[in-house]
Image: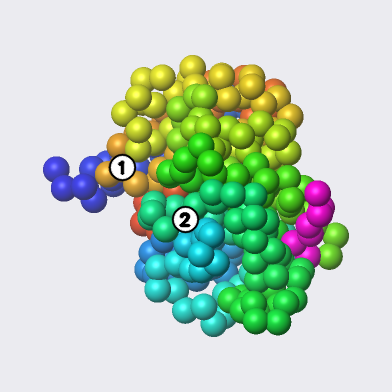
């Protein structure tokens, strides 16, 4: 069966399951209704404004600032989306109550923070390029729009990397993404626990508001994500944890909506610090309508 046909068949089954399961179990657990989505990975996903206007998401994370480090070079990759207009879209999202963060890192190899100085320099750049700062010579890609947070999406690193310094500097300054809006400091790791040392040092600071644990695109996670989830949530009780799921049926670890209902949501919501769902990403979600089918369980 072709992928699209399989998806349509799965969608029919999921909708049927939703209709048949509207009982007490649907209200079980610590439901929050919070759904975060990543935007910026495909120019065909539509604008940031369109994503916010769907009403599906309670936070959008722009991805990625994928080049930073001791060389002082910075690069924003949002997959061919025109930069012009994104600032206005950010303001629109914020106006309707959807905060917008910036994720740093990604799947490339052009980022590192091998020293305290590199970390402080990155903080200085982020503050002046995307938040409330204004420094001669620092370009603001989104104009005078102020973002609401920083997310660490780190696929590689070394023991020397100082993401802990970056996190502490963000917390020390009590940065605000806009008038009266506190910065959201988040991380989006793979589900392995303990996490890689360079990320562990950062999360161990205890100042991360949210961690999105990705339970997809990882062979070990498919069988052991429940155990890893319990380890993550127990280790950082002051942090809210989001279940990171993919909206693409073609990605390893995709969870059928009925299994979100029967397994993922009730299992994750046993944790007192459960926060919600994280969906990767807006492009696939637009194609599959995945969030529209699972949002009720979040």
Whether residue 37 is visible, yes or no, is: no
Q: Nearer the viewer, mark 2 or mark 1?
A: 2
Residue 18 shown left or right of residue 238 in the figure? left
Residue named by callout 1: 251
- Disc 2 secondary structure class: loop
| Residue 266, picture quadrant | top right
Which residue is at a point 41% across and 19% down the rendered structure image? 224
Q: Which callout, 2 or 1, points at the residue further toward the start of the chain?
A: 2
Label 1 crowd (10 A; few <14 / some 14-19 / many >=20): few
Disc assigned to residue 111: 2
229 to 38, vertically: above or below:
above
In the image, residue 109 lies in the stretch drawn in magenta: no
Foreground pick, 94 / 67: 67
Disc 2 versus disc 1: distance between alpha carbons?
Answer: 25 Å
Q: State which quarter of the image contains the C terminus.
A: top right
Magenta stretch bounds: 172-178
Foreground pick, 135 / 105: 135
7 to 121, vertically: above or below:
above
Q: Position of residue 8 (x, y in %)?
A: 28, 46
């Amino acid at each position: 069966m072709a992928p699209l046909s399989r998806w349509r068949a799965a969608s029919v089954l999921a909708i049927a399951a939703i209709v048949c399961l509207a009982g007490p179990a649907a209200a079980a657990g610590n439901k929050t209704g919070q759904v975060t989505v990543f935007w910026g990975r495909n120019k065909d996903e539509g604008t940031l404004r369109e994503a916010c206007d769907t009403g599906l998401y309670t936070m959008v994370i722009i991805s990625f600032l994928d080049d930073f480090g001791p060389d002082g070079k910075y690069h924003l990759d949002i997959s061919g989306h025109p930069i012009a207009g994104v600032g206005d879209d950010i303001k629109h999202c914020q106006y309707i109550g959807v905060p917008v963060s910036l994720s740093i890192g990604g799947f490339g190899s052009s980022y590192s923070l091998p020293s305290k100085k590199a970390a402080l320099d990155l903080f200085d750049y982020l503050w002046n390029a995307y938040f409330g700062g204004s420094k001669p010579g620092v370009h603001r890609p989104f104009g005078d729009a102020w973002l609401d947070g920083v997310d660490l999406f780190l696929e590689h690193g070394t023991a020397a990397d100082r993401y802990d310094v970056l996190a502490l500097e963000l917390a020390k300054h009590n940065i605000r993404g806009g008038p009266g809006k506190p910065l959201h400091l988040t991380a989006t790791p793979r589900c392995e626990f303990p996490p890689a040392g360079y990320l562990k040092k950062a999360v161990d600071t205890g100042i991360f508001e949210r961690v999105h644990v990705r339970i997809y695109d990882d062979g070990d996670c498919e069988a052991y994500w429940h155990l890893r989830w319990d380890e993550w949530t127990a280790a950082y009780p002051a942090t809210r944890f989001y279940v990171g799921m993919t909206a693409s049926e073609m990605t390893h670890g995709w969870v059928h909506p009925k299994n979100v209902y029967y397994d993922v949501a009730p299992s994750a919501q046993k944790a007192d610090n459960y926060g919600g769902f994280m969906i990767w990403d807006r492009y696939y979600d637009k194609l599959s309508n995945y969030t529209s089918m699972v949002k009720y369980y979040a």
